């Protein structure tokens, strides 16, 4: 049975109780490059999509998938969280599990070893006030498969990521979003060679039928990855197209 059929059945059952009413939505899209926190994940075009169920009282859960060289072929992220509004403030918190479906068959980019498991979990908390949004993510076991390559201690695997973005709306359908983020922690140093800052500037155009187009310039302050020239992470332009729909 297809995952969407399972989710649709579960959503219908939950909504029928009244207390668990909500909305079940999906999205599908493509980007010229899958960039995650300023780092190239696909080395080229990526097809992506997901499904989400949001309860009326603020709880939400979902699944998102993409092709990804970082995972040896594919990435599947499962997440759940809770969001609420207090006056003019929006608050949000939850957990994400990043699953790489073919990573144990691929060669690890850092260690050169085949058969390592790159899956990891992150907790997050965020807040927003008007056009400003801040979010912090923490993964206690991000660098577990690098064996302490840089830190010298295989038990130090944590990663902390903090990001801020500001949405400038020119109209109901056109917006510009500057963003900056910072990656730190021993797990991050093992995986990327050092702590680093990423940045992006994204223009989003909303069109009819929940279709949107985007153009972004994305980069980091990294010159290399663990001492190796990493030119693919120089600033680059990324175009995208995304379609949302109700299920």
Image: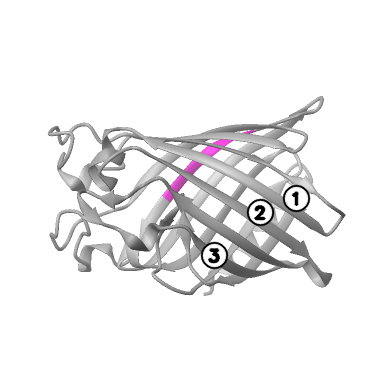
Image mark for residue 22: 1
- N-terminal-most mark, 2 or 3: 2
Indicate the secondary structure of the residue bearing disc 2: strand
Residue at the farthest top position: 87
10 Å crowding of disc 1: few (<14), some (14-19), many (20+): many
In the shown orientation, is residue 171 left or right of residue 16?
right
- Where does the image place residue 128, in percent across and percent down from the top left? 69, 33
Q: Give the range drawn in magenta.
A: 92-97
Query: Eyeballing the image, is 41 above or below 194?
Result: below
Marks 2/3: CA distance? 32 Å
**Quadrant that contains the C terminus:** bottom right
Closer to the eye: label 2 or 3: 3
- Mark 1–mark 2 contact, CB under 8 Å? yes
Image mark for residue 53: 2
The residue under the point 22% across, 59% down is 109
The residue under the point 67% across, 49% down is 177
Classified by dominant secondary structure, the portion drawn in magenta counts as: strand
- N-terminal-most mark, 3 or 1: 1
In the shown orientation, is residue 129 left or right of residue 223?
right
- Where does the image place residue 148, in percent across and percent down from the top left? 16, 39
Residue position for label 3: 237
Indicate the secondary structure of the residue bearing disc 3: strand
């Amino acid at each position: 049975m297809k995952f969407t059929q399972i989710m649709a059945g579960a959503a219908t059952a939950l909504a029928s109780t009244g207390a668990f009413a909500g909305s079940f939505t999906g999205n599908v899209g493509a980007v010229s490059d899958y960039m995650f926190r300023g780092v190239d994940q696909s080395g080229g075009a990526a097809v992506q999509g997901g499904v989400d169920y949001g309860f009326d009282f603020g709880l939400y859960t979902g699944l998102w998938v993409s092709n990804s060289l970082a995972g040896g072929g594919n990435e599947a992220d499962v997440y759940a969280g809770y969001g609420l509004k207090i006056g003019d403030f929006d608050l949000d918190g939850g957990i994400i599990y990043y699953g790489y479906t073919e990573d144990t068959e691929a060669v690890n980019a850092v260690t050169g070893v085949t058969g390592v498991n790159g899956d990891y979990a992150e907790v997050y908390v965020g807040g927003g006030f008007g056009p400003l949004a801040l979010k912090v993510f923490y993964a206690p076991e991000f660098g577990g498969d690098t064996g302490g390559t840089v830190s010298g201690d295989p038990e130090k695997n944590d990663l902390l990521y903090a990001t801020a973005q500001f949405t400038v709306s020119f109209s109901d359908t056109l917006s510009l979003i500057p963003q900056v983020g910072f990656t730190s922690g021993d797990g991050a140093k093992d995986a990327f060679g050092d702590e680093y800052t990423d940045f992006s500037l994204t223009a989003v155009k909303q069109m009819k039928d929940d279709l949107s187009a985007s153009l972004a310039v994305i980069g980091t302050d990294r010159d290399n990855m663990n001492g190796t020239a990493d030119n693919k992470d120089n600033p680059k332009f990324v175009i995208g197209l995304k379609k949302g729909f109700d299920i």
